[in-house]
Image: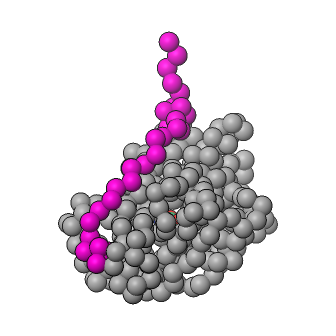
Amino acid sequence: MNRPSNLDVLLQPRPPSPLQEVRDTRFDRHGVRLLLKRDDLVHPELPGNKWRKLAPNLRAAVAAGHGELVTFGGAYSNHLRATAAAGRLLGLRTVGVVRGEELAGRPLNDSLARCAADGMRLHFVPRCEYRRKAEPGIQAGLLAGAGAQGAYVIPEGGSNALALTGCAELGRELRGSTDIAAVACGTGGTLAGLAAGLGPDGRALGVPVLAGGFLEAEIRSLQRRAFGGPAGDWALAEGFHHGGYARVPDALEGFAAEFEDRHGLPVERIYVAKLLWALVELSAAGRFPRGTALTAVITGRP
Ligand SMILES: Cc1ncc(COP(=O)(O)O)c(C=O)c1O
């Protein structure tokens, strides 16, 4: 009997991730049903949107005969960590181009240490160059500097056209059971795919975790590249970044810890905590009509 390859084991079709309804007075009192889409449980090593985005890219990389993946991220990037884990599981070399040349001589933080332990080669680059990494000339220089010229390139946050098709599957899993599906946004790729997959009866709501307000154009552009034009009904709820990326003020920390106790859900702080906080606030402000089935997509775990 043939043993399944690492690729089959890693990328086999997963059942839909669980959808759990929870009782929470902060929603109940406004007549809103809160559901948690436990995408954090979709894959043991590549939770949530990491699996949704990486799986189609890993299939494409292996099908094209690549032995190495290269991607980009900051020092705390969940995406770098997931790519490193995928490389280990599939026996592919991985290279991480990391924002911040100044980090090169310092001890690695926990996140980068896990990347390195999974075999990822880390290449630290100056922030000014990193910002321009999508420009072809600059990218070629960065890849050459990292010794990764022939590698399969996955963009920062993993959000390319293939990734959006993976995230659309998440939307399809929610058809018929949700009116609004809400998700935290970094690059906006997960929201862009989710909205496309939800179909005509559902709406997607994105909560940006970065300050800036540049996401709408980026999401439109991602959808153009993946689906040829606008897809699905989506909107952004701005104002819930809590000071910016990776900032977790005490009040947010307390909120997340309390949510964990109340519902037994491990709450990832950088994205998921901000999403849940935003939903509580928006519900209190009467932004969801009574009777709404509101799904919070749990895109990762701590
Ligand atoms: C747990 C988690 N949720 C949400 C996101 C946001 O995803 P996107 O970049 O597709 O907007 C990320 C991004 O890395 C993440 O790690």
User: Residue 230's quadrant in the figure?
Assistant: bottom right
Residue found 57% across the figure and 85% down from its top? 212
Q: Relative to 127, is 14 above or below? A: above
Furthest toward the front, the residue is 291
Task: Pinpoint residue 223: horizontal percent, then vertical percent.
Answer: 70, 64
- Answer yes or no: is residue 35 visible: yes
| Image quadrant in which the C terminus is located | bottom left
- Seen from the viewer's position, the closer of residues 300 and 17 is 17
Furthest toward the left, the residue is 261
Colour approach in the figure = one colour
- Seen from the viewer's position, the closer of residues 59 and 297 is 297
Residue found 68% across the figure and 49% down from its top? 152
Q: Is-magenta flag for residue 247?
A: no
Instruction: Give the left or right position of residue 14, taking residue 155 as reference.
Output: left
- Seen from the viewer's position, the closer of residues 301 and 145 is 301
Residue found 41% across the figure and 57% down from its top? 37
Task: Pinpoint residue 4: horizontal percent, then vertical percent.
Answer: 51, 24
Q: Relative to 131, is 158 above or below? A: above
- Residue interval drawn in magenta: 1-29
Task: Pinpoint residue 188: horizontal percent, then vertical percent.
Answer: 58, 69
